[in-house]
Amino acid sequence: MLAILHEDADLLVVDKPAGLVCHPSKAGETSSLIGRVRLHLGHTEGRLVNRLDRETSGVVLIAKSAQTARELGKVFASDGAVEKVYDAIVHGRLDGAVTIDAPLGKDERSPVAIKDCVRADGAPARTDIRPTAALVLAPGTFTCVEARPRTGRKHQIRIHLAHIGHPIVGDKLYGRDERIYLRFVTGTMTPEDAAALIVPYHALRARRLAFSWRGRRREFEVAITAPASG
């Protein structure tokens, strides 16, 4: 039920699969990560320290008590205190490293209420991107990239990669047609939509989480696999 990367008296670290929401849902305890965590712990004190989008897989840190959650919350709220590394597969060929420094805010032109975009009056956002491999497959040309967000804005990596013309493979919202997302949430996606996405979940994986806490360096990492898998 849980892919556990580490567990001790204070912390639980898991590899969240793609397609699983972090927060409680109406579909039962096992339909969300926090529900599965509470079943594993046998109590309701577990708190998510970091969160991932439903389709993003990878490292999630859970505090086993409110006190631990408060301590870690302060660490994670400090600029530059937490190292986060993601792997992604993007459309097109990216030949060199790039730093994307572009503010983010609500996309008022989009019919999707949760969608954000790059906008001049948005909150500062910065992501470092480094290509790691080029892929030439039947559907086209792609690049495997490593992404290091230096700020923590909603959908930051996905928006920034789309902004430079390299959207993440399988991204229904920030890909090449946001109408696919609208059809997805209404259950009306077509076979053509699925073919355009290539993969069922966007190809983004939270590979590494590292920070200092209680006088020790904590580092948690998942194996490098296809980012869209969980």
Image (cartoon, helix red, strand yellow):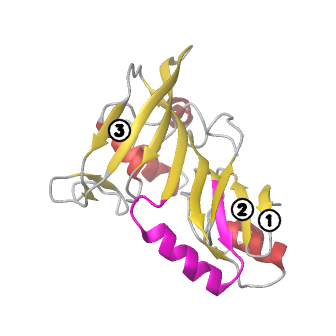
**Label 3 CA crowd tier, 10 Å (few <14, some 14–19, many 20+):** many
State the quadrant of the N terminus: bottom right
**Residue 28 or 218: which is nearer the viewer?**
218
Q: First in sequence: mark 3 or mark 2?
A: 2
The numbered disc on residue 218 is none
The span picked out in magenta is: 59-81
**Which of the two discs, 3 and 2, sits closer to the camera?**
2
What residue sits right under mark 3 in the picture? 162
**Gap in Å between the C-alphas at discs 3 and 2?**
30 Å
Q: From the viewer's perspective, is residue 12 above or below residue 190?
A: below
Count all numbered tags in the image, as a single digit. Answer: 3
Residue 203 occupies which quadrant of the picture? Answer: top right
Q: Amino acid at mark 3?
A: Ala
The numbered disc on residue 7 is 1
Q: Amino acid at mark 1?
A: Glu
Q: First in sequence: mark 2 or mark 1?
A: 1
**Judging from the image, what secondary structure is the residue with disc 1 in?**
strand
Residue 29 occupies which quadrant of the picture? Answer: bottom right
Assess whether residue 64 is covered by the magenta stretch. yes
**Judging from the image, what secondary structure is the residue with disc 3 in?**
helix
Q: First in sequence: mark 1 or mark 3?
A: 1
Image point (42%, 58%), residue name? 80
**Residue 24 or 161: which is nearer the viewer?**
161
